[in-house]
Amino acid sequence: MKSFQQAKWPEPVIFEIGSKGRRGYSLPVLDGNLRSMLNDRYSIPENLKRKADPDLPELSEVEVARHFIRLSQMNFGVDNGFYPLGSCTMKYNPKMNDAIAALDEVRWIHPYQPEDTLQGMLKIMYKLASWLAEITGMSRFSLQPAAGANGEFTGTLMIRAYHAFNGELEQRREIIIPDSAHGTNPASASMAGFDVVIVPTDENGCVDVEALKEAVSPRTAGLMLTNPNTLGIFENKILEIEKIVHEAGGLLYYDGANLNAILGKTRPGDMGFDIVHLNLHKTFSTPHGGGGPGAGPVGVKKHLEDFLPVPLVEFDGERYYLDYDVPHTIGKIKGFYGNFEVLIRAFAYILSMGAEGLEKIAEISVLNANYLASRLSKIRGFHIPYGKDRPVKHEFVLSCSRLKSETGISAKDVAKRMLDYGVHAPTVYFPLIVKEALMIEPTETEPIEEMDKFIEVLTSISKEAYNDPEKILTAPHNTSVSLVDEVKASHPRTLCLSWRMYKKRIEKLH
Ligand SMILES: *Cc1c(COP(=O)(O)O)cnc(C)c1O
């Protein structure tokens, strides 16, 4: 295999570069008259003025450019390599969507502008909401939530408001969640004030329906479910599950963070779900992973429309407007109207894909996942505990528990060694029901060559595990940062969160 080597710059922090008074620009000197005019007009009261200049880095343009380019070369992202991070849908995001979000007409709008000057943007939001409703089989969407977890919180607050409206909130205190669920599900349910009841997974990797029957009761407020679930398996008893929960008087919440597998094929609305959230920053093409802005729109069926957050974007046949007239609204869930820059990327993405393109996403992402699942599960030391008898959907969970017992090499060690081959590690140790889990999601954007390379990488790591485990245990070797001491790296005494903190520590050392 061709070797991979990440850049290794001895790059200082930006405060250590440059020198006092150095600048990246030069402006003409202000003419005396203009200066006094500006001073008169915009004079800042003395007591509000800073006494000393802030302690900022002072650099020339070339120093800034080199600094950040070097840092970027020591980083890894979907733009420079394979990134099979299961559950996170790290697909490649077409640059065209960024270009559209960067248009002046988009960049320079302000949420306080009068509605009449924002008709085009409101139309985009209105259309996007109606497309998402069509894609999911729901009746109305709010674009406000800022991320998946924020959407779940919105949804569970609506479950609360619905039961309160029906006078049943006192009694309905429980939300049922499968043990394979994303960690945000139980967190959101308890933030909304519910008790969480966990149902186990059966040997086929699906919700244990008998256990669900026992879990539902007059205390049930709802069920939160991901389908396909986090094992990448489609819950084929979904209609039976829907009946059990609805008959008990609960609502069904669909965690649609990863919609890749079902786009254009099936819809949560048709499966009987009452509430859905989507992660536009996963399925609908927004760069994510660095803590940047996301969007977690929430859609509902007709009977829950009156509980949606305000404002909603409405159209009266002539003009678009912000509608605050939602009778039982849970209120506002985020400032203004959502992360518009993310919404516009999703709008451009859906528009450029079209209905056929969206369906192709589902087909290719599932095909890619099955190709990898079938090849990787044949490598010595690896197997797929759930889903070996039927096709997986957009992702699958590979276990290296055999590798661990035969060679001592764990999922963590395999993940670290992968970095040496120029691929990002998959999600590890999740879901918790699989031992030594590597959760792999190739997405539809990877060419077959990239997946074949990944198969070669895992084959090679397996050989190393049986022949030269030391090489794996000391990995990564080819990355800009080598093996870190994980305990030390996350200990509050060693964590250094700011330049000021770092400087104090250094001073103490000397
Ligand atoms: C990513 C994800 C979430 C949470 O989304 P955030 O935007 O990170 O808050 C919830 N559920 C599933 C299944 C996910 O993959």
Image (spheres, rainbow, N blue to C red):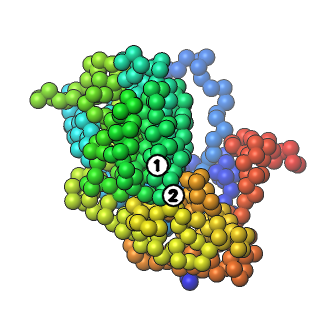
Q: Quadrant of residue 243?
A: top left
Per the image, label 1 sits on a secondary structure element best described as: loop
Residue 316 shows in the view: yes
Q: Secondary structure at mark 2?
A: loop
- What's under tag 2, amino acid-wise? Glu
Is disc 1 surrounded by few (<14), some (14 to 19) or many (20+) residues within 10 Å?
Answer: many
> Residue 207 shows which numbered tag?
1
Seen at 66% across and 26% down, the residue is 51
**Label 1 is placed on what type of residue?**
Val
Residue 84 image label: none
Q: Residue at x 66, y 60 (%)?
A: 11
Quick check: 81 above or below 286?
A: below
- Within 10 Å of the Cα at label 2, are there few (<14), some (14-19), or many (20+) other Cα atoms? few
The answer to whether residue 340 is visible is no
Q: Is residue 404 left or right of residue 86?
A: right
What residue did someone put label 2 on?
203
